[in-house]
Amino acid sequence: MAHHWNLDPEVTFLNHGSFGATPGIILEEQTKIREQMERDPVRFFESDFPKLWDSTRKSVSDFLNADMDGMTLVNNTTSGVNTVLRSLHLNEDDEILVPNHSYQACWNAVDFVTKRSGAKTVVVEIPFRVNDSQEIVDLIMDSVTENTVLALIDTVTSPTGIRMPFEILTKKLQGVGVDVLLDAAHGPGIVPLDLGELDSAYCTGNFHKWVCSPKGSAFLHIREDKKRLIRPLSISHGASFEGSEQEKFEFEFGWPGTQDPTSWLSIPATIEFMEGLVDGGWAEIMQRNHDLAVEGRSLICDAIGTSAPVPETMVSAIASVEIPSEQEVGPISLEGDPFHHLLMDKYGIQVPVFPWRHHGTRYIRISAQLYNHIDEYNFLAEALSEILENGETLQGQ
Ligand SMILES: Cc1ncc(COP(=O)(O)O)c(C=O)c1O
């Protein structure tokens, strides 16, 4: 199915997880919306945009089985997480739980709000290798105290590629009075998400990753009882708008100031296009990508000489494996990992390799999307075997 995407045919692209990739036909669709906007920007923003914004929120809400009144669009998950955290009024005794597999940018946002208020970030230490999801549930629940007010829970973790038991965690945490902020950056299109059933206080996630819509298309859903508390990062015209609470909520989030909304507005067409690519729609896409990631992971484990770190049920469409490293593992650097560069420069394989200092480990993470084929993971496995046999550098610098 690779012909639907504009990816470079010279590159073995095994990193859908970082930024997604958008089919060519959707980019054309986005251009059409942009042309409509530029034919008469005033008419577009004053008349067309409010209707398109509503129909996009409706489509997103239907896809996630969410109450549309609490659904807003944001540019990315980082903004969604910041929107919630920076609206909270924390007290000095409050604690926010963050598992040590959390995406560093979102973890940083937690640290920012706890530091400025004198509250506390409580890091839940979870090893990379776990036998089952119950281990994760127990470690997180054991970290709850009477001061815990919020937990940042990923649907799928970024560095370690673990499909978290987020459904049970949301139920258990909220059952003991801890609000859950679900980080569903790897959410729509990679794991089944039923926001009505989950009932998390907050959920934010990307459409530009696994639904493949243009970059800058994400959602933030806020449960009814929390809507008054949460304000957009950009305080704009909506703040002085005199209408109903619901109208004000929609206006505040819908108009953060002038920007190009075409990524948001391309979401409905992307959902429809992608689900039409296979007979079984989104359920089949998720199953195929999961199966390919599991198969690919097994090839890579064999090449590295290691075993599967987590059971298959804890894999979605991304999977991480440890890369042997003799040197101390530092923070993620702007220069990138030399092992990543070696795979890219010598073999043309685009796959992330990065240090995760919270585990003192470097990981290689594969992704599987409809355009991938098992031969690509075989090629990566051969490259890894060759590099290891030749004793080429595996050291993080
Ligand atoms: C778990 C997780 N949270 C948040 C993000 C941030 O996504 P974005 O860059 O779209 O804000 C990512 C990105 O990879 C992620 O994996």
Image: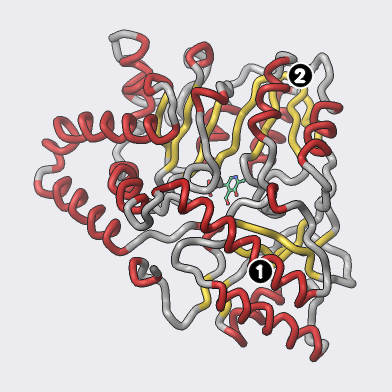
Q: Where residue 250 is drawn, which disc sits there?
A: none
Which residue shows up at 72% across the image and 35% down it? 111
Quick one: 158 or 198, which is closer to the camera?
198
**Quarter location, residue 84:** top right
Which residue shows up at 21% across the image and 51% down it? 34
User: For mark 1, does the 10 Å Cα neighbourhood hold few (<14), some (14 to 19), or many (20 or more) residues?
Assistant: some
Which residue is most to the front? 279
Q: Quadrant of the C terminus?
A: bottom right
Residue 44 locus on image (x, y percent): 15, 38
Question: What residue would you read off at disc 2?
Answer: 94
Residue 119 locus on image (x, y percent): 76, 23
Which residue shows up at 10% across the image and 43% down it? 40
Residue 23 locus on image (x, y percent): 34, 61
Q: How is the image coloured?
A: secondary structure
Question: What residue would you read off at disc 1?
Answer: 336
Q: Amino acid at mark 1?
A: Gly
Q: Amino acid at mark 2?
A: Asp
